[in-house]
Amino acid sequence: MAAHMRRRLRKGATTTAIAAAAVAALAASQAPAATLADGSAGSGDPKAAGEDTASGETDGAATGNSPYYTDLPPLVTPDRPGSSSGLPAAGSAEAGIPASVLAAYKQAERTVATTDPSCRLPWQLLAAIGKVESGQARGGRVDANGTASPRILGPALNGQGFALIKDTDGGAYDGDAVHDRAVGPMQFIPSTWASWGQDANGDGRKDPNNIYDAALAAGRYLCANDRDLALAADLDQAVLSYNRSTEYLRTVRSWYSYYQRGTHEIPDGTGTLPSTPSTPTPSPRPGTGSGPSATPSPSPSPSKPGGKPSPDPTKPGGGGSTSPTPKPPTPKPTPPSETFGSLENAGTGPLRATAGQAFDERVSVRARNALGAPLAKVPVTFTVTGGTGTLFAGGKKTVMVRTGADGTATAPELQAGEKAGEFTVTAVAGTGRPRTLTYAATVTARQADAIARTDEKALVAAPGEKFADAVTVEATYKDAAAAGVAVTATMVKDRLGVIDNDKGPYFKDADGEPVRTLTGLTTDDEGQLRLPEIFADDNEGTYLLRLTTEGGASVVIELTVKATEETTPEEPAPGGTTAPEPAETPDATEPPAATKP
């Protein structure tokens, strides 16, 4: 609370010069006076309280100080003072705001209230700026998605009556590769949009010609620098940051006050268009109309009074007829239909493949011109970057493909390398200010869904000896031999492999030391794997060897360690002969054999 009070005191201590000027101007025009809270409208910025900024400077203004409409609200307010309730459709035409435009302003207010509640952005301020900048998107001429159609462009900011701003976007937003122009219903210059652009309608694009995107961008821009727009000083500073002109501030303030008294929704495309642009007014090109979307044409240079004709150097004495000095040709901006605007994903799905296999998906992009239409014949360079060994078909890491009539370019098929891991595919198009898209891709290790021994012979060894028979297994995937599958072999105490065994059979490492786990084993081209030699220690018993594959298949093999049975050799009789075996003793239970008498 103390910090808030200090902020309020600091904001309230600024100059009242603008407030007085605004009230005086509004009174003179008979427009409704804007309410200036706290008795101050000053911004604390020397440029805010002074005269209009020179036309050749932008000084960070969102619009580049481009022209705007100076029409003021009607004398009769739409509702009683202090009311902000909606009005019926029969209300004043000036109070009507097109449905999509009004929805965008209110959506922006709700969004900012969630992300920056201390700003206290009122949607009526966005409406006031939208009215002054573009006549509410030319009376609500927007499509179903809220995008102005045709797009709204201010005149070229070429320094001829306006600020001089050389091209910053390659014509992507404004279709002008020579100078910047203010773009869209909220009239952002491209460099400002690059920093503040928003995607408020969730279509994946930040489009300054979309009223939802532009309204949210304007709201966030006005809230910059921790402004509290419920404070008059902060509100004035925000408006002046949009266009550094005291006349602009007065005009926006008057519409803000007007809309606070009440508005109503009207159908898109039926709004009232303003008619009076700010000065200086450039001469519009034929067929482009007037106002902020008009394009200035340079005035012809007048002849210098008293000037002497230049001598013809081709004639003796330099006399004779004269020829006018040719003027350098004026560069013509590239038509928007031919200007590269954006590069976007053309529906590429997840890029995943098993090592050594071909990817099912192919990387596809779409190029659009400055008007958002597909652009053909644009060269797109695709590059694979990463350590998996993945390449395009033909063994290339970089390929170039031109877009077709639908603006799409599809890279060749990707062939996964042998090393599992992640890599990227980058698509680059455009010159000067190239557009780039990056796709993440993954190579997974070869997998097996089954593994088994190739024979069933018992594996037995005596203590301290090695097992005479080798262990050979075969891995398969969907009943086919699985080549190149990683296998891990571990001596375990249980069939699930939860507990490793630290005694019994073992392998040997490169130094001849006992190890009971082997990694890095791989099946051959036929899916088979022959394990290294296995040795037994001095502990007799039955032990378990568990083999697992990438993919989760496993097999458990029994290893038996036991001593061999020994037999006692026969001893020779004295004299070197073997003693005869003793006669069998008759069974006492049997009767004696009969004898002859």
Image (cartoon, helix red, strand yellow):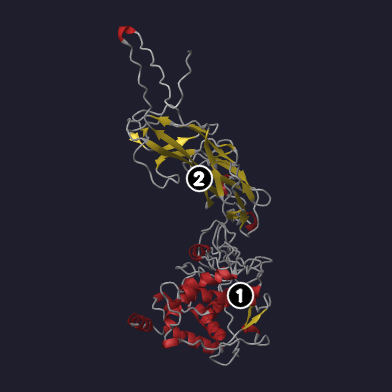
Furthest-front residue in this view: 597
Callouts 1 and 2 close, C-beta under 8 Å: no
Q: Return the x and y of residue 185 as percentages of the image width and height.
A: 59, 71
Of the pair 316 and 314, the residue shown nearer to us: 314
Viewer-nearest of labels 1 and 2? Answer: 2
Furthest-bottom residue in this view: 80
Mark pair 1, 2: CA separation: 56 Å
Of the pair 49 and 118, the residue shown nearer to us: 118
Q: Return the x and y of residue 531 as percentages of the image width and height.
A: 45, 32
Quadrant, the N terminus: bottom left
Query: In this figure, which residue is indicated by the disc labeled 2?
Result: 552
Of the pair 371 and 535, the residue shown nearer to us: 535
Q: Return the x and y of residue 25 as percentages of the image width and height.
A: 51, 86
Furthest-top residue in this view: 575
Query: In this figure, which residue is indicated by the disc labeled 1?
Result: 101
**Drawn side of residue 569 relative to residue 245, left or right:** left
Asked if residue 327 shows in the view, the reply is no
Q: Amino acid at mark 1?
A: Val
